[in-house]
Structures are given as C-alpha cells and as structure tokens.
Amino acid sequence: MSALLEVQGLQVAYGSILAVKDVSLTVNEGEIVTLIGSNGAGKSTTLRTISGLLKPKAGTITFNGERIDGKEGHEIVAKGLCQSPEGRRIFPRMSVRENLDLGAFLRTDKAAIEVDRERVLELFPRLRERIEQKGGTMSGGEQQMLAVARAMMGAPKLLLLDEPSMGLAPVLVDMIFETIVKIREQGITILLIEQNAAAALDVADRAYVLESGTIKMSGKASDLAKDEAVTKAYLGG
Amino acid sequence: MSILKRSKSATKAGAHATSQRKWAIGFLIAAVLIWVFYTYVMVHLPDGIQTVVQNWFPPTSLNEALVWVICALGLNIVVGYAGLLDLGFVAFWAIGGYSAGWFMSAFFTQVNFRVFTTAAKALPGIHISFWGVIFIGGLICAFFGIIIGAPTLRLKSDYLALVTLGFGEIIPQVFTNGSNIGGFNLTNGTQGISPVDNIGVPGKSLGPFDFSWKFFIFVFLTAFMVFISLRLRTGRLGRAWLAIREDELAASMMGVPLMRTKLSAYAVGAFSGGIGGVAFATHVNGVFADRFNFSISIILLAMVVLGGMGNVWGVMVGALLIAWINSTGLPAFGDLVNNTFHTTINFPSYNFLLFGGVLVLMMLFKREGLIPESRLKAILHESDDTSTNVGGSH
C-alpha cells in the first residue's frame, strides 16, 4: 500500500493562536482512516488546511506524491481530493440534481459524470426520489446524503468526510456509516473526521486521536477501540 | 406528481432551446408593435388621446428606459447572479459615457483619428463608429471592474458594498475635476463633452433626434444583454455564480475558483454598464459629469430588487417601471393632481420617498420581487411548510 495523503508536522494558527500544533498522519490507498477527538481539538482545522481553505504555518501536506500545502482550494479539488463539509453546506436553493452537478464542477467528461451520477444515486436511492427537490427543503439526513454524494461527484481519489453523523438520528447515523463502508468498496479512500468515536472506530481501519492540536495516539482502529484511555475519554466507558 | 416532474426534466433541454427562440421572437414583435404605434398609428389618433399618450408615454422616455434596462441587467449579473452587493454601479455608466465622449466626438482636437465613422471629414478628434465604441467602452469598464474587484473581492459582502460605494463616488469626481490633469484636459470638467457623433447605420446617420431609429438600436442592445444574461446563467459560469451566491465556502470546496468567478461577474456587469453608458451618451448627445450621482446606483439597485433579483424578465420589468415612474409617470401624475385640485405640489421631488416606501413594502410583503426567480421563491415560501429549516445547514 502506498501513501495517498501524507501530513508531516502540520501547524495551523488563527492569528497568534495555534489551533493545530503538531499533526502528522498518513492515509494509504484504499483505507478508511479516522481522526477522532473532542470538540475544539483541531480536527476541522486540520481538515480545512488539507483542503486548502487555510494555509499551514509549518509542515507539509503531500497528496498523491505532490505537495499541496499552500495551494488554492480549487486546485486541490482538481487533483481528486473532495470533501463533504462540516454542517453539510449543501446549496439550499438548488435542486438535488444541480447540487450533484456542482460536485462535478471541475470535470468535463460528460459521459463519466453521467455514470458517476447513476452510481451515487444507486448508493443513495432517497436522492433519486428527490432529484428535482430543492436541497434546502430536505431533512437533515437527506442533506447529509446529498453532501456526501456531491463530494463523490468530483471523482475523488480521497474523500474527506467532516462530521457526517453530526445532528442525525441514531438510525441515520448507522445508515451513513454503512454507506461509508460501501463507498470504500468502490475503491475510494476515506479520511473520516468524527466526534462519534465509537461509530468511527467501528468502520475505520486505522485511527488517530487528536487532543488540543496534537496527535496523541494512533494505531489500528480495533486496537484503539479497546484502549483504556480512549475508551474513557471518547467512548463513554 | 413524481411522473409529472420527471417528464418535465426530460424535456428540459429541448424546451430550453425553443424558449430561447420564443423570447427573441416575442421581444422583437413587442418592439415592432411599439415602433409601429408611435410612427404610424399615433398620428391618426384623435387629438385628445394623442396628448394623453404624449404626456404619459412619450417616445423619448422609451429610449432612456431601455438604457436603464441595459444597466440594470448588468447589475443583475453582479447582484442577482453572483450575490455581490454593488452600490457604485454609476461608475461604469459614467466610464461608458466618457468612452463615447472620448472616442466619438471632436473633443481631442489634437488628433484626427477615424474608423468607420459618419462624422464630417473636417472635424478633428477621435471618431470611431458607435459599434466600435460600444465594444471599447464595455472593455474599459470591464477593465475597471477587474481593477476595483481584484483587491476588494476578498472582502465579505458588507465591506465590499462600502468599497463599491466609494468607487461610485470617486469616479464621477475624477470626471468632474478632470479638466486639468497635469495640464491635460481629459474630461472637460463640469461642462462635459458634447456633442457626440451620430450613430452610423447602413444608409443613415442617426443624430440626437432620430428617436424611432435609435429605439431599434437600443432594443437590439437590450436583446443582446438579455441573451448574454440567459446564456451565462445556464452555462458553467452561471452555475458557479449561483453556487457562490448560495454558499461561498461550499462553492470553493466544489472546486469553484472564487476570485476568478467573482471577477468575471464584475467584469461582465461592468461591460454592460459600459454599453449602457455609451448608448446613453448618444441618447442625450453628450456626457456630463454632474449627471452621474449616487442616486443612479441606488435606482439601479432598486430596479433589480423590485423586479426580482436574478430573474432577467423581472429585472427588465422593474427597470422599465421605475424608469417610467422617474422620467414620466410621477411628473405626469403630479400635473394631473395639480391641475385637478389646483395645488402646486412638486411631485417629482418626492420620487425617493416613493421608492423608499415601495422598497419597504416589497421587503415586507414580496421579498422575492415582482417576477421572482424560482429559487428565491422556493426559499422564501416553500420553506414554511416543510419540517426542516433551510438555514440549518449554516
């Protein structure tokens, strides 16, 4: 397995406040890797830096063998790193179809886009039922499906999922995590950021634990799920 | 219901092409009818009706209204499509006007440069054909749009509005005071530049009083703007604009290059302002710095908001309506009231009170405008009767 994404010694600051102090992580091709941690640990900041919305203060980010730190967001998307943002952020006044089209904004291969649309609608049949409905009129769970489907329309090599279970009913959380496994089966590598550590560790191959801007632990997800410190801090044990 | 929806979407592509042809034909028929009415029908009408038409719908105000439509459609691209508030659109109107002053008049007596012009050979100055100047004026405006946009578009909407407001104040001031820039007379100060050349069309040269022929030229320019607006909207760039209007951050996550996309909205909007400015200069036969004041920016914005932000037809109706009220409707109404009740109220001076009132009422009762864009209507009304709130995703 080769490293698809490699983050080395990442530091990110908001003004003079260091939100991410020392993050190094690797995502290999075909893996589901999860980054867990409590609220304010720096998970979203890390992810926003990887996707080019924030510029790192120090450290390097390498994607597919290429340095991407400091590049603009749209350049990074073009390389095949797509994300489903925290809080879903679908386009509320656009139909499901238009939302999906925007996910494929940078692609020009019409036939392949059509194939991918079929593929994500296969994955989320609910979206097919609502294809002409405005995104903003759907339920939270449906919006989350749309956000993931939209990111997949960018033909990602690596899919970043930022808190996909946030604010969803337990039955929908299960459904989202089942889908994440299905997405991996289609050959898409996934970096999953979650507060719901139990569910995340359940589907992931490997995991990193982020605490106040620093990676505190890492290892196989199944091992971490049994780890006493992790259980105590994140799994309510 | 769902079957109905699906079949609608299936025929979307085909219906799209025919609807484009349909509007063009409808638009042309309307223009021809109006022209036939003023040129041939009106002279045969009884005197009483002729006076009423002259008072309430004079043909001259029609051309000016079309200039407003052109500029409002340009502003609609910036405000309605891309969601960037611009409070200084008058600057582009002014720059377009001065392009006409510079490139189609005898103002620069130092040079004698002529391109496809119908201006008299003896006249010095730069004389470029109206059709060329339309293009040049548009490009200069687009250039200034990018100049002002590049450093400021990183700002969030409120601050951007402030910068554009300043731009709209500065540019007319430059023109007012530009009679002596290091000894060079660029703008002729408050006297302005007048007259400008006639519009050359095959076999004719349209001077300041050829209203009915110019009407067709302005109709053509308006149609051009409508065409551009509709085409851009359904294209890739239009989708990127809408995405930015909806959610800038999400748009950038989809790979929409924010700066480039916003700048292009600015440039296209400014280009239209330039076209309107050149057209207006030929309409009033000159360009005068004191005409370009802040109220023009606000009136244009009111046209876009009243008509329906983002909807081309709505903006056109809004622009025609407000332009008519401003130039004819309110004075004519004032005369009627004053003559009937023997009062001496100066109605036109209350136009901003009226606009202000109308805008407040619109915001209270019909926020999406007279002819709303389907998306806006959806968000302002449909969201009431579904269980989820639209804003929840932010």
Image: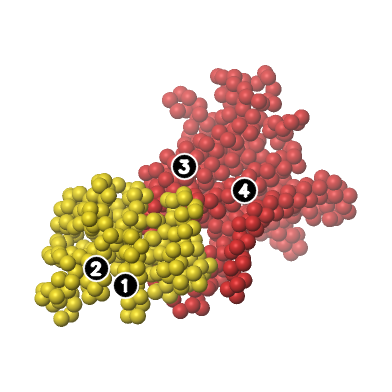
SS for callout 3: helix
Dot 2 and dot 4 residues touching (CB under 8 Å): no
Residue under label 1, please give it: A177
Please rate how many residues cluster around mark 3, counting C-alpha atoms within 10 Å: few if below 14, some from 14 to 19, many from 20: many
Circle 3 or circle 4, nearest the eye: 4
- Which is more N-terminal, label 4 or label 3? 3
Q: Are the residues flagged by discs 2 and 4 from a single subunit?
A: no
The chain holding disc 2 is A
From the viewer's perspective, is A217 left or right of A169?
left
Q: In the picture, one chain is yellow; tell me its letter.
A: A
Provide the residue designation for mark 3.
B145
Disc 4 residue type (three-letter) = Phe
Give the residue type that dot 2 points to: Ala
Chain for disc number 1: A
Q: In the image, is residue B380 above or below residue A155?
A: below
Q: CA distance from mark 3 to mark 4?
A: 21 Å
Is residue B142 shown left or right of residue B250? Answer: right
Q: Determine the chain carrying the residue at label 4.
A: B
Residue at horizontal 46 percent and vertical 23 percent from the top: B183
Residue A167 picture location, percent across and down: 33, 75
* In the rendered image, the vertical position of residue B308 relative to residue A136, given as above or below: above
Residue A204: mark = 2
Q: Which residue is mark 4?
A: B227
Q: Residues within 10 Å of mark 1 (few under 14, many from 20)?
A: some
Question: Quick one: label 4, few (<14), some, or many (20+) residues within 10 Å?
Answer: some
Upstream in the sequence, badge 2 or badge 1? 1
What residue lies at 68% left-to-right and 33% top-to-bottom?
Answer: B199
User: Of tags 1 and 4, which is closer to the observer?
Assistant: 1
Q: Nearer the viewer, residue A25 or B37?
A: A25
Image position, residue B84 (x, y; %) = 45, 53
Tell me which chain appears red: B
